[in-house]
Amino acid sequence: MLDITIKCHTTDIVITGGSSGIGKALAIEFVKKGASVTIAARDQEKLKEAETEIKAFIKDAENQKVHWVAMDVSKDYMDVERSINKAESQLGPISILVNCAGTSISGTFEDLPVEKFQQMMQINYLGSVYPTRAVVKSMKSRRQGRIVFVSSQAGQLGVYGYTAYSPSKYALRGLAESLQMEVKPYNIYVTVAFPPDTDTPGFTNEQIGKPKETQLISQSSGFFKAESVAKSVMEDTLNGRFLCSVGLDGWMLRCLTCGMTPITSALDGIQQVFLMGVFRLVSAFYLVSFDRIVQQCHRERKQKEKSS
Ligand SMILES: NC(=O)C1=CN([C@@H]2O[C@H](COP(=O)(O)OP(=O)(O)OC[C@H]3O[C@@H](n4cnc5c(N)ncnc54)[C@H](OP(=O)(O)O)[C@@H]3O)[C@@H](O)[C@H]2O)C=CC1
Ligand SMILES: CCCCCCCCCCCCCCCC(=O)[C@@H](N)CO
């Protein structure tokens, strides 16, 4: 199905958000495969530490390199372009760009400061647009490339508490679908990944002030290790799969919400045709349980208010 084979030892990869969590785990997986990797994030100390950690997985010291570039993906496009050019001058043309830099905030719609809605779009959405914009021209001219967007299961269904976060992750899917249609003639393949809750420093941070509802609803699709998320993302990227999911619920969601996404695997296409309706039925049970969670928490809050 795919007409490019990526030779991993010549594959140069840029991973935004590569200094922590899923991004760092991805850098390690790609390095284990024999690739050279540049990680990008803001904090230089974290980048240096991650670089050392990732380097330990190098197999072929002569051909494999690990570098870092400091950049804020969300602020100034020209700055992002300069950093991407720097990465290219160190490693050569970028074959794979992974847009993993991102963050989350939760809270009820009313409680979230309005700036947070802007911030989420700025980091999670525009922070993926800018690096992509900076690599696409060179990928097109070489007629080779992979672009990955790390969305979230909260980019497939709206969840209590994620009114600011979820839309920024949904936006990535719209971007991915449109971009894929444009770049396919240039042999560039786009992957959009929808991870569930994953054990990362970002996840730990996110727990502060997270509504109980958000926590309970999210945990229904499990809690995964960054390494297993990274393995799925890498495999689907190398295979040119458009949709990437993790876990059983992730697989059901991928099938249920496939919409008009490109069919990049025959098996996926067949599953979608036959299972979408079934999974819609399954989703009804999940929705009932989510409703119960929301009602229960609502009652608990009312009681607390009364007694205080
Ligand atoms: N963990 C989870 O449960 C899930 C996470 N995701 C998504 O996966 C991605 C990674 O998450 P996770 O590994 O948990 O997060 P972490 O907080 O552990 O890592 C985030 C990385 O992104 C970098 N980053 C954040 N903001 C910027 C910015 N403005 N410019 C450049 N780099 C930035 C951070 O470095 P620095 O701060 O130094 O810039 C860090 O390297 C995110 O997009 C997240 O939304 C999706 C589903 C579940
Ligand atoms: C057939 C239907 C199956 C339905 C299964 C539905 C289960 C969905 C639960 C919602 C999970 C939201 C996780 C968000 C993770 C995330 O992005 C944050 N942790 C970021 O830090």
Image (cartoon, helix red, strand yellow):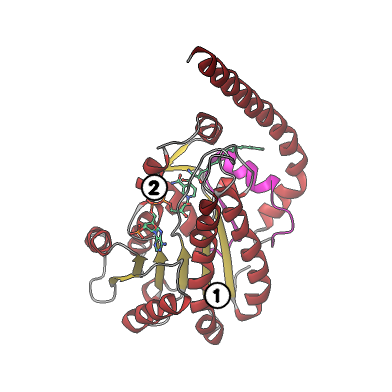
- Residue linked to disc 1: 4
Image quarter where the N terminus lies is bottom right
Q: Where does residue 81 sit, x and y in percent of width and height?
A: 44, 79
Q: Where does residue 85 sit, x and y in percent of width and height?
A: 39, 82
Which of disc 1 and disc 2 is earlier in sequence? 1
Q: Nearer the viewer, residue 148 or 291?
A: 291
Q: Nearer the viewer, residue 175 or 106?
A: 106
Q: CA distance from mark 2 to mark 1?
A: 34 Å
Does residue 274 sit above or below 75 in this rendering? above
Q: Secondary structure at mark 1?
A: loop
Q: What residue is shown at x 50% (from left), y 84% (from top)?
A: 138
Q: Amino acid at mark 1?
A: Ile
Q: Which residues are magenta?
A: 239-262
Is residue 34 at least partly visible in the picture? Answer: no
Q: Amino acid at mark 2?
A: Gly
Magenta stretch: includes residue 256: yes
Rendered image: mark on residue 126:
none
Instruction: Answer with the quadrant where ligand 2 appears in the image.
Output: top right
Magenta stretch: includes residue 130: no
Rendered image: mark on residue 202:
2
